[in-house]
Amino acid sequence: MPRTKTAGPTATRKKPVKRDRAAAGKRIESMAKGIAGLVGKCQDPFIDIPSRTLSNVRFNEKRGIIELLDGKQRRFFFSLLGRRKGEGSQAKKFMQTVRVAEVCRRLIDANDSTSIRDLFYNLKMPIKSGNGKGPKELVFNEQSESDPIIEDIEVTVGALREELGVHAETKGTMVGPMTVNDNGDTIELTAMGSGGWGVPSIVESDVIRFVKCKAKFILLIEKGAVWQRFNKDRFWEKHKCMIIHGGGQPPRGVRRLIFRMHNELKLPLYVLVDNDPWGYYIYSVLKQGSINLAFESQRMAIPAARFIGMSSFDAERFDIPSHVPMPLTDEDRRRAREIRNYPWFQKRLWQREIKHMEALGVKLELEALSNKHFSFITEEYLPKKLKDKRWLD
């Protein structure tokens, strides 16, 4: 059996971690020194990786966010077996973890950054065997192997991947009555045409600075195509708001930017997503944080976020014909049962919402409102819901 240590999770509050690239580099160095120290003592080197699983998080009702607990998984070098069937050897994962950490430290030292895709290709190289006669094996075969290792490094040294010099592809667009300074360039976000301003993956205050803001709230729209309708109809101008989308599940850059706008500019956040379990989950990630990134909930989650649609009750309220909604799939129903049991969905009105969707057996996409007319969502649906304060917290 592999030697895997899983510490029992506790709810101990952790001290705030210093946030800058130099500090992240020092923590990587400290991790490396710990490994070298074990080797020097002729002990099997290991790395303790905080466990990013449902069993190692808790929902802090007082703070309204998901928090990471103290459970850890110990990854040994001299172990040819994985913890679970088909997982691969701990030895390889140990080596992969060290290699990714090494590249991140080099990026920090050079004050450079690269994409997660570039990092994968940089490390897609053969492993040198001791005698050079064994079969050649790659450090990483697929990006699906390297991405989780990056997250392991993040949570182990207490830094976002952007602080480690690794960033994702730019994804997300925003427009509205605000002026920002983007890496030295002043940009007026009311004059971005039909495409809007592309939200970068790194949006910290040393890169993105808020110069002027006349917006009254933020509207996060799940889909880019629906965002286009809101921009075309100049919803942001009529209602003095920032409209932003993340192309489905918002990437970290969009989440961090919304977090900063909410906390620094005191703008309320309204979330407009499909009426299905996946839309509910997108909202919950914005509001409480995610299980996978629970260690960063305090820098991303917005407990005051409001769900403004679509709701399982909207078909009746807005007289949407019965042939328009789509039937729930078996996967939709499985996911609905799953999220209904999450602690952060236990409020009475949320249980009512989810159960009503299950009872109807259908889901409503935002585009379903186009059955009335193309601008129904911007001219009637959302203005009425805002006026009536018909949202879920």
Image (cartoon, grey):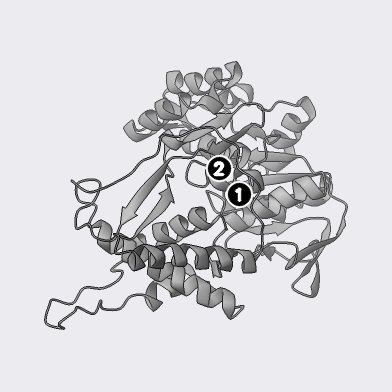
Instruction: Locate the C terminus by quadrant.
Output: top right
Give x and y (percent) for residue 112: 58, 78
Q: Is residue 85 left or right of residue 386?
A: left
Determine contact: label 2, label 1, CB under 8 Å: yes
Q: Is residue 47 left or right of residue 43?
A: right
Q: What secondary structure is marked by label 2?
A: helix
* Number of marks present in the image shown: 2
Of the pair 291 and 356, the residue shown nearer to us: 291
Q: Is residue 279 visible?
A: yes
Tell me which amino acid carries mark 2. Answer: Glu
Q: Residue at x 77, y 25 (%)?
A: 388
> Image point 41% across, 29% down: which residue?
338
Q: Amino acid at mark 1?
A: Val
151 or 352: which is nearer to us?
Answer: 151
Give residue 226's mark.
1
Q: CA distance from mark 2 to mark 1?
A: 7 Å
Point out the image quarter for the N terminus.
Answer: top left
Q: Which residue is mark 2?
A: 367
Of marks 2 and 1, which one's residue comes earlier in the chain? Answer: 1
- Residue 334: image x %, image y %? 36, 30
Which quadrant of the figure has residue 269? top right
* Picture coordinates of residue 219, whole percent (x, y): 71, 45
Q: Secondary structure at mark 1?
A: helix
